[in-house]
Image: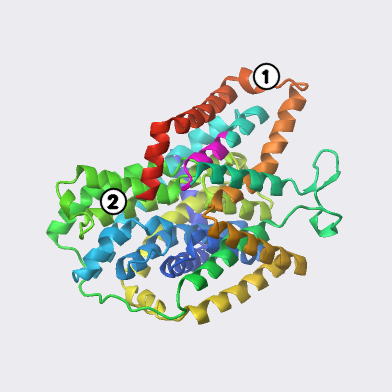
Amino acid sequence: MALLTHLMLGFSTALSWENLLYCFIGCTLGTLIGVLPGLGPVAAIAMLLPATYALPPEAALIMLAGIYYGAQYGGSTTAILLNIPGESASVVTTLDGHQMARQGRAGVALATSAIGSFFAGSVATLVLAAFAIPLTEVAFRFGPAEYFSLMFLGLIGAVVLSSGSLLKALSMIVLGLLLGLVGTDINSGAQRFTLGIAELSDGLSFVALAMGIFGFAQIIRNLEDNDGNGVDVSRISTLWPDKTDFKRMRPAIYRGTLLGSILGILPGGGATLASFSAYALEKKISKFSAEFGHGAIEGVAGPEAANNAAAQTSFIPLLTLGIPSNAVMALMVGAMMIHDIQPGPQVMTNNPALFWGLLASMWIGNLMLVILNLPLVGLWAGLLRIPYRFLYPAILVFCCIGVYSVQNAVFDVLQAVGFGLLGYVLLKLDCEPAPLLMGFVLGPLLEEYFRRALLLSHGDLSTFVTRPLSASLLAAAAGLVLLVALPAIRRTRREAFRE
């Protein structure tokens, strides 16, 4: 009964004309960002963070969430029509989706993607609503030691589940933690690593770092990787799958939804891990495994359902525990802090309209996305013909205006440019920047809870292992480290990410 009351409050908030408008804007921008190859939701949200500064908190978070799950829809469009994933979670969709397009079934592939995404997104939002209240009650039992251990587990998970070299991922986490130290010490008031620059007394700008590392760097990389011209798009015929297609796609959508809902909660995992895992599962258990890579509809339905389910459930640790599970959620933490909202269990009690309004907006947004992605697929395909050399300079200009507008400071724009160059170097070195952002966001919080725990225990480090919940979380972190250190696991991990 309490859940029903909360949901009624959520829908009353989400259905206000202002929040409906920003939900629509977020879903539209998310679809656009997903369609344009190379940008992705992280870069898009980083670019639009300054724009949310003047919005009410509910509208800001509803719009940013719409961009995230909207990009999961839009990313499949280029994956199917062009064999180019719009963002990383759509990489797997290229394998069979583009083959279906080459066989004249592009419309069926796009419809399969939209149907799977809508079902998975709707079910995963129900999962989020069901888990919210009990997890929040558990979170209220957390003290500083438990929060430190939970954040430490999150950082370890981000290293283990990131693609590529473990050493590089660990280096990115450490670099992010070091960048988070810049500024004024919260306890002593002493300035640290500011190099005498007054603008750094409040620390490095989160917006500038996120936009530089993900936005500017990715744009430079995209301009380097293509000739600056538009592209030819596969022809779209019928959109509706037949009875046989529905029979084959339905179980794959169910399995992808279940798998994505579970994997979305894991730190560092998110939509990309879910889509890869769903494809591997479908290929292993399908009666049509020989068709995989040649246009199997399960190869589209399963991964697309999984990545959308994961996108929704990745909000669970953020909204209930205050811990971001991936780079997008780290950006959402930044957006909440811009609006003076402390992420964690107190959001539900102190601002229930925000919490439940965001959940309700996800159902509304998923419905909007079906309407945006099926009837308007020709419009999105047409955008791919715009030459990159015209598109990306305009995006860069708006990025610079956005960074400047947060504090009306040229120094922030210079920071963004510097971080853009750093991000480009990291991309050239095959270093994944997402762990860096996780380290930057969680670093100051990790330090704060570590100090609080020691203050309460009078400097006794054993407090982290004598409290059962804290000890369990640290044991889980140690287990992850030991597990990934095993040669067989390390070899399997390398092969999985290479595939």
- Determine whether the residue tagged by mark 1 lies in a helix, strand or loop: loop
Residue 342 shows up from this direction: no
Q: As shown in the figure, which amino acid type bears the numbered disc 2?
A: Gly
The percent coordinates of residue 15 (x first, y second) are: 48, 60
State the CA–CA distance, disc 1 to disc 2: 46 Å
Q: Residue furthest left?
A: 244
In primary-sequence order, the first of circles 1 and 2 is 2
Over which residues does the magenta segment extend?
A: 153-164
Q: Position of residue 17 (x, y in %)?
A: 51, 66
In the image, residue 357 sits, relative to residue 147, either above or below, namely below
In the displayed structure, does residue 298 sit left or right of residue 10? left
Say above or below: 220 vs 192.
below
- The residue sitting at 60% across, 45% down in the picture is 171
Q: Which residue is mark 1?
A: 462
Q: Residues within 10 Å of mark 1 (few under 14, many from 20)?
A: few
Q: Callout 2: few (<14), some (14-19), or many (20+) C-alpha neighbours within 10 Å? A: many
By what rule are the colours in the image chosen? rainbow
Towards the viewer: 203 or 237 = 203
User: In the rendering, which numbered label is found on residue 289?
Assistant: none
Instruction: Return the residue nearer the eye: 348 or 75.
Output: 75
